[in-house]
Amino acid sequence: DADVTQTPRNRITKTGKRIMLECSQTKGHDRMYWYRQDPGLGLRLIYYSFDVKDINKGEISDGYSVSRQAQAKFSLSLESAIPNQTALYFCATSGLAVSYNEQFFGPGTRLTVL
Amino acid sequence: GQQVMQIPQYQHVQEGEDFTTYCNSSTTLSNIQWYKQRPGGHPVFLIQLVKSGEVKKQKRLTFQFGEAKKNSSLHITATQTTDVGTYFCAGNNAGGTSYGKLTFGQGTILTVHP
């Protein structure tokens, strides 16, 4: 959905570099999530935030950090990228007011770490 | 922590054949959601099941939630080439402050041969 945008869409970087992936949403949702997708492993939760002052680790948070700059913005940082962080990264949002509390995903960022 | 297992990982069918993917959780779920990801796309919400034993239909898709709220299935009748993609189940924990945090299965990649 265009309501959830991610930048950049593709990024190639080198081991040791600091990388920031950004997510913005215009859906007015309070909850935001970062996932990574690897073949055969599905979607694994990295971090999630239920409001601006709430940040929680997901199942694979090591090597990542996040910042919730505003209700509409949630960024993911790799402080020192390593090759096994090569993956497809998705941002998602949800809101309590949404009928099923389903998650709306951005288009994804394909990250390659050389 | 909660685990959600999904099988099979891959399924190849001829157009017109049926398809089923199964999802099992290690813990009792509040609800389960299903998502579809088209090739090159992002996951898109299909449906949510909440009640024990619930069955819901969307045209050729039938979704079931087990009596114990620990397993679910998605069945597609007479597949079409437009059904290709990866189907994910995602479980929502029963109760607790992390309600809304989904645990995704590994996904089933469906290929439909014309």
Image: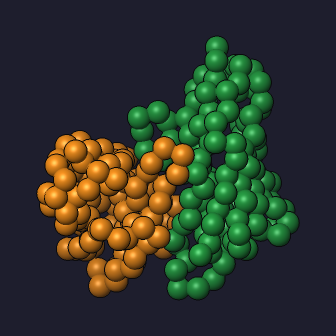
Q: Colour of chain A?
A: orange
**Residue appearing at x 29%, y 80% in the figure:** A52
Q: Is residue B38 left or right of residue A18?
A: right
How was the colour assigned to the protein in this rendering?
by chain
Q: Is residue A44 left or right of residue A52?
A: right
Q: Residue furthest left?
A: A17
The percent position of residue B49, horizontal first and vertical second, equals 70, 61
Q: Residue furthest top?
A: B114
Tally the numbered discs: 0
Q: Colour of chain B?
A: green
| Rendered view: B58 above or below A71 | above
Q: Nearer the viewer, residue B74 or B110?
A: B110
Q: Nearer the viewer, residue A22 or A44?
A: A44
Q: Would residue B110 be seen by someone viewing this image from the given angle?
A: yes
- Where is the C terminus of chain B found, in terms of image quarters? top right
| Rendered view: B28 above or below A41 | below
The percent position of residue A33, horizontal first and vertical second, equals 39, 66
**Residue appearing at x 30%, y 44% in the figure:** A110
The percent position of residue B99, horizontal first and vertical second, equals 55, 77
Q: Would residue A24 be seen by someone viewing this image from the given angle?
A: no
